[in-house]
Image: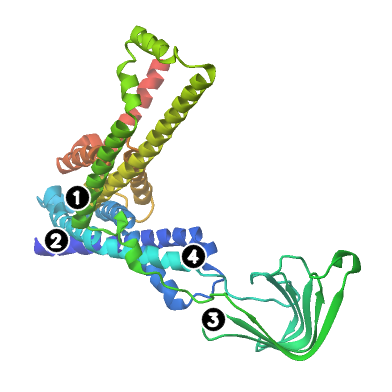
C-alpha cells in the first residue's frame, strides 16, 4: 500500500507543479501586458524588473494555486483511468476512497500552507509589490534624444540634434528652444557641436556647446511688438544645465502603504477594523450632537410636521408684526439654514459611506485569508472524481473541464466581493458564496465516484443516449 501511495503522489505532484507554474506564468504575462506602458522606456535595471515580477508572482498565487489543484487532480485521475490503472486498483479490492487518501492528506497540507501564505507572506508581498510598482510608475522615461527629431521631454525646452557620434556623447548641429518664459520661440541657441552628459545624480543634463550663437527677441522694451528688437550673442563655449530630470528611481517609504488592508494579517485586520468602527461611531455621535445643538429650529420644525394647523397658526403669528423686507430676510435666513443642513447631512452621509466601505474591505480581506484554503480543498474534491469519471489525461479534456469549473468559481467570487464592497451583501456571505455553491457539487461527485455509481459513468451516458435516439426513431415511425 505504501508503494501505491508513493506512486499516486508522484503522479499528482508532477502535474500540480507544472500546472501551477503555467497558470502563474499566464497571470504574470497578463500583468506585463497591463503595465507595459509603465515599464517600457524607463531604463529600469534588471534587478528591479526581477523583483517586480517576483512580488507580482507572489500576489497571483491565490489565483494560480486553486486552478492548479483542480487541473492536476483531473489530469492525475484521468491518466489513471485512461491507462486502466484505476480499474486494476479497484479490481485488487482498493476503493477509490483509499486511492484518494494520500492526495486528500496532501491537499490538507497544501490548504494549511495556503492559509499561512495568505496570512503571513501575502501581506508582505503585496506591500513590496505595490510600493515598488508605485515607484516604477512614478519614474520618468529614460532620456532618449534621437537624431533629427525635436525632443520636448525636458520641461520648458525643445531640443534638436542633427547628429550623434557612436559614443553618444559628442553631438553636432545642436538647436535648443527656451520656452521657460512662455512667450513662444523668443530664445534660441544653436551650436556647431558639443558634448552631452548626465550628472552623477541623474537629475541634471549638461550640454557643453562650442561655436554657436544665442538668439533672443527682446520683449522687455516699450513697443517691442512694433519694433521687434533682436539681439545675437556669439560664443566659443557655453554650458547649459537642464535640471529637475529625476531620471533615477526614488524609493518610497514602505510604511506609507502599511495601513492598506491588503498589507495586513488577521490580527492587524481585526485591530484596524475595530479602530475604524470606533471612529465611525464617534463621527456619527458627533454628527447627531451637532445637528441637535446647532440646528434646534430643524428639530422643532420636524416635531411640528404632523401638526399642520398649529404650524400654520404659529407661522401667521410669527409674521404678523413684520413688514415685507423683514419677512424676506427671515425666509432667506431659513433657506440658507436649510441648505446648510442639507449640505452637512450630504457630506456626512458620504463620509459615513466611505468609512463603512473601508470597514467592509477589511472584513472581505479577513475572510479571504480562509477562502483560499477552503477553495483548494473543494476544487480537489471536484477535480479528483471528475478525473476518475472522464478517464482522459493530458491537457485536452481536463483543461476544458477545469477551466469551466474555475471560471464559475472565479465569477461567483468576484461578483460576491463586488456586492460586499457595495454594501449589497454581508462580507461573510459574499466571500463564502462560491464555496457554498461548489461544496455540494464536490460532495456529490465524490460520493458518486467512490460508490461506483453508474449515474456518472460515461459508458452509461452513451448507452442512455443511444436508447433515447432509438426510441425517438421508433416514435417517429
- Element at badge 1? helix
Position of the N terminus by quadrant = bottom left
Q: Nearer the viewer, mark 2 or mark 1?
A: 2
Name the residue at 43% across, 74% down. Answer: 48
Question: In the depicted view, which residue is nearer to us: 166 or 453?
Answer: 166
Q: Badge 1 local density, few (<14 within 10 Å), some, or many (20+)?
A: some
In the drawing, does residue 108 fall left or right of residue 53? Answer: left
**In the rendered image of this protein, does residue 416 appear above or below residue 227?**
above
Q: Nearer the viewer, mark 2 or mark 4?
A: 4
Mark 1 or mark 4, earlier in chain: 1
- Element at badge 4? helix
**In the rendered image of this protein, does residue 226 appear above or below residue 67?**
below
Identify the mark at residue 5; answer none if there is no mark: 2
Mark 2 or mark 4, earlier in chain: 2
- Element at badge 2? helix
Mark 1 or mark 3, earlier in chain: 1
Residue with the mark numbered 4: 137
Q: Badge 4 local density, few (<14 within 10 Å), some, or many (20+)?
A: some
Question: In the depicted view, which residue is nearer to us: 325 or 147?
Answer: 325
Question: In the depicted view, which residue is nearer to us: 169 or 436?
Answer: 169
Residue with the mark numbered 3: 202
Cα gap from disc 1 to disc 3, whole angstroms: 69 Å
Question: In the depicted view, which residue is nearer to us: 53 or 80?
Answer: 53
Q: Quadrant of residue 410?
A: top left
Cα gap from disc 2 to disc 4, whole angstroms: 50 Å
- Element at badge 3? loop
Locate residue 267, reporting x and y percent: 18, 56
Residue with the mark numbered 1: 87
Amino acid at each position: 500500500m505504501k508503494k501505491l501511495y508513493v506512486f499516486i503522489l508522484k503522479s499528482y505532484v508532477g502535474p500540480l507543479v507544472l500546472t501551477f507554474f503555467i497558470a502563474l506564468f499566464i497571470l504574470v504575462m497578463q500583468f506585463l501586458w497591463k503595465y507595459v506602458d509603465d515599464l517600457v522606456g524607463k531604463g529600469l535595471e534588471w534587478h528591479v524588473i526581477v523583483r517586480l515580477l517576483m512580488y507580482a508572482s507572489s500576489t497571483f498565487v491565490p489565483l494560480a494555486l486553486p486552478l492548479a489543484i483542480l487541473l492536476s487532480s483531473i489530469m492525475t485521475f484521468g491518466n489513471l483511468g485512461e491507462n486502466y490503472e484505476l480499474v486494476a486498483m479497484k479490481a485488487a479490492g482498493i476503493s477509490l476512497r483509499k486511492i484518494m487518501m494520500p492526495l486528500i492528506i496532501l491537499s490538507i497540507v497544501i490548504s494549511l500552507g495556503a492559509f499561512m501564505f495568505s496570512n503571513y507572506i501575502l501581506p508582505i508581498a503585496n506591500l513590496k509589490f505595490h510600493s515598488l510598482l508605485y515607484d516604477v510608475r512614478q519614474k520618468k522615461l529614460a532620456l532618449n534624444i534621437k537624431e533629427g527629431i525635436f525632443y520636448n521631454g525636458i520641461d520648458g525646452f525643445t531640443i534638436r540634434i542633427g547628429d550623434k557620434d557612436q559614443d553618444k556623447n559628442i553631438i553636432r548641429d545642436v538647436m535648443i528652444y527656451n520656452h521657460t518664459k512662455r512667450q513662444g520661440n523668443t530664445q534660441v541657441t544653436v551650436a556647431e557641436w558639443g558634448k552631452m552628459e548626465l550628472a552623477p545624480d541623474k537629475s541634471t543634463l549638461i550640454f557643453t556647446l562650442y561655436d554657436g550663437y544665442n538668439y533672443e527677441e527682446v520683449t522687455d522694451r516699450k513697443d517691442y511688438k512694433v519694433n521687434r528688437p533682436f539681439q545675437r550673442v556669439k560664443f566659443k563655449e557655453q554650458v547649459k544645465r537642464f535640471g529637475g530630470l529625476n531620471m533615477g528611481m526614488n524609493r518610497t517609504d514602505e510604511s506609507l502603504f502599511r495601513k492598506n488592508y491588503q498589507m495586513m494579517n488577521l490580527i492587524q485586520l481585526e485591530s484596524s477594523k475595530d479602530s475604524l468602527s470606533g471612529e465611525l461611531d464617534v463621527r456619527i455621535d458627533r454628527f447627531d450632537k451637532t445637528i441637535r445643538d446647532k440646528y434646534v429650529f430643524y428639530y422643532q420644525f420636524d416635531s411640528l410636521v404632523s401638526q399642520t394647523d398649529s404650524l400654520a397658526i404659529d407661522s401667521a403669528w410669527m409674521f404678523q408684526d413684520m413688514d415685507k423686507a423683514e419677512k424676506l430676510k427671515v425666509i432667506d435666513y431659513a433657506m440658507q439654514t436649510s441648505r446648510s443642513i442639507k449640505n452637512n447631512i450630504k457630506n456626512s452621509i458620504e463620509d459615513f459611506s466611505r468609512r463603512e466601505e473601508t470597514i467592509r474591505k477589511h472584513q472581505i480581506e479577513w475572510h479571504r485569508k480562509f477562502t483560499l484554503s477552503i477553495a483548494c480543498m473543494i476544487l480537489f474534491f471536484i477535480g479528483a472524481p471528475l478525473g476518475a469519471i472522464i478517464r482522459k489525461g493530458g491537457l485536452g479534456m481536463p483543461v476544458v473541464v477545469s477551466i469551466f469549473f474555475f471560471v464559475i468559481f472565479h465569477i461567483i467570487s468576484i461578483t460576491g466581493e463586488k456586492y460586499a464592497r457595495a454594501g449589497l451583501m454581508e462580507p461573510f456571505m459574499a466571500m463564502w458564496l462560491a464555496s457554498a455553491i461548489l461544496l455540494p457539487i464536490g460532495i456529490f461527485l465524490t460520493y458518486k465516484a467512490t460508490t461506483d455509481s453508474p449515474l456518472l459513468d460515461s459508458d452509461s451516458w452513451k448507452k442512455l443516449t443511444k436508447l433515447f435516439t432509438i426510441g425517438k426513431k421508433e416514435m417517429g415511425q
